[in-house]
Image (cartoon, rainbow, N blue to C red):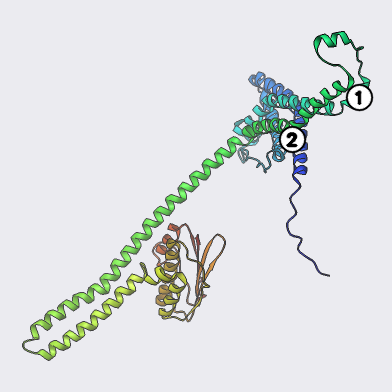
Amino acid sequence: MTTTDAGPAPAPHPTRRFLRQLGIDTQYVLVGFPLGLIALVVGITGFALGTGLVVIWVGLPIMVGTLMFARGFAITERARIAPVLGRSIPQPTYKRVRGQGLLRRTFGPLADGQSWLDLVHAIFRFIPSTLAFCFVITWWAAALAGLTYPLWDWALPHPPDNYELHELLGFDDSMGTRILFNVSIGMFFAGTLYWVVRAAALMEAHFARGLLIGAWELRRQVAAAEEARDVAQRQKAAAVSAEAVALRRLERDIHDGPQQRLVRLAMDLGRAEQQFADDPERARAIVAEALTQTRETLDELRALSRGIAPPILVDRGLRAALTALASRCTVPVDLDAPPIDRLDPAVESTAYFVVAEALTNVAKHSHANEVQVSVQRIATGLIVTVSDDGVGGASLAKGHGLAGLDDRVRAAGGVLAVDSPEGAGTRLTAALPI
């Protein structure tokens, strides 16, 4: 028995969608009218009794009960407006009071702003509900009555024709003219039925949405904006920290390597200059040694420049740069980096820096026999993994060698994780957004 992929379901016919939406909007308005009446009566009665009896404390439980009724009505209304608006409507988070005594938990809804908005909606939604109900009933009645008029015209009383009056007024009251006139009215109302019902339902639904989830969505947007601002500030701080660490490391490496060699080179050349007249052979030997130091200094400067902006990364991309990096590592590297399209230069530079720093730490501290480097591109970003079989014990805590690497990754908007149990190797994973 074989199965075949049926594929996505075909889209409904436009006429079917049209009629389906008309039915949804009609039932929303027709059901909303009696619900609005109930909410209005209960809401006003409960609010009036609650405020009137609050001086003797009896009003507080009544007010809480009214708010809870309004909340239940609001939850129902949010579910009802979802098909009208064509999208899911979230339920806002209500304020909860926990662990602060029975009374505070019982009267907690009194301090919840959304509960009061629910009550305002329960009381005032009767206004748009009534307007929408009147329009929908009028248009449906006129459309149905006009289109079916030929079927029941006979049941209506008609006065006898007064031909002299018809001739004087200039119109004809014959049955055919009467039917044509009423059917024309029905066709007009039927032709505009969808748009009138749709407008009435949207008016009522948007009124409910504004009170029932508008304030909550606004608070959520503000919270998201504040979170984005905090993330941006953390990324900025991480970038500044990573840049400072990189500059200090570069300064240290230059001071310990090329700078010392250049100082020695200057001293050797000065000594050779003094010995050219008295001992030319010795001077030539010093110059030859100085040339060797010059080449070694250039090699060290090239190695340092690779950690900043390696030309192969700029010219040929991340895969070629990692291949060159793996070939220079003193520990055997198993590189898994399939060809990928060029990424943003900042992402490629960060990924290269992660691998370069990780391989440097492996060579210096891990005592590993092998390193696995993996680069995978997924829908949301780039995953870089470096794992070894060394002694472990690596950490992202401040004061460790990977702290600056963590700052570098966070500055690019990514996340760095390290799994390094003692004696079981180290696995470093960086997730970078693209």
**Could you tell me which residue is drawn at 10 percent across and 82 percent down?**
273
Taking the image as shown, residue 110 lies to the left or right of residue 349, namely right
Taking the image as shown, residue 16 lies to the left or right of residue 351, namely right
Residue to which mark 2 is pinned: 25
The amino acid type, in three-letter code, at marker 1 is Trp
Label pair 2/1, CB-CB below 8 angstroms: no
Structural crowding at the residue carrying mark 2, measured as other residues with C-alpha within 10 Å and reported as few (<14), some (14–19) or many (≥20): many
From this view, report whether residue 93 is shown above or below residue 117. below
Report the residue that reaches farthest toward the left: 277
Mark carried by residue 152: 1
**Could you tell me which residue is drawn at 70 percent across and 40 percent down?**
82
Taking the image as shown, residue 102 lies to the left or right of residue 404, namely right
At mark 2, the secondary structure is: helix
| Closer to the camera in the image, 296 or 151 | 151
Residue 389 position in % (x across, y down)? 50, 77
**Which quarter of the rendering shows the N terminus?**
bottom right
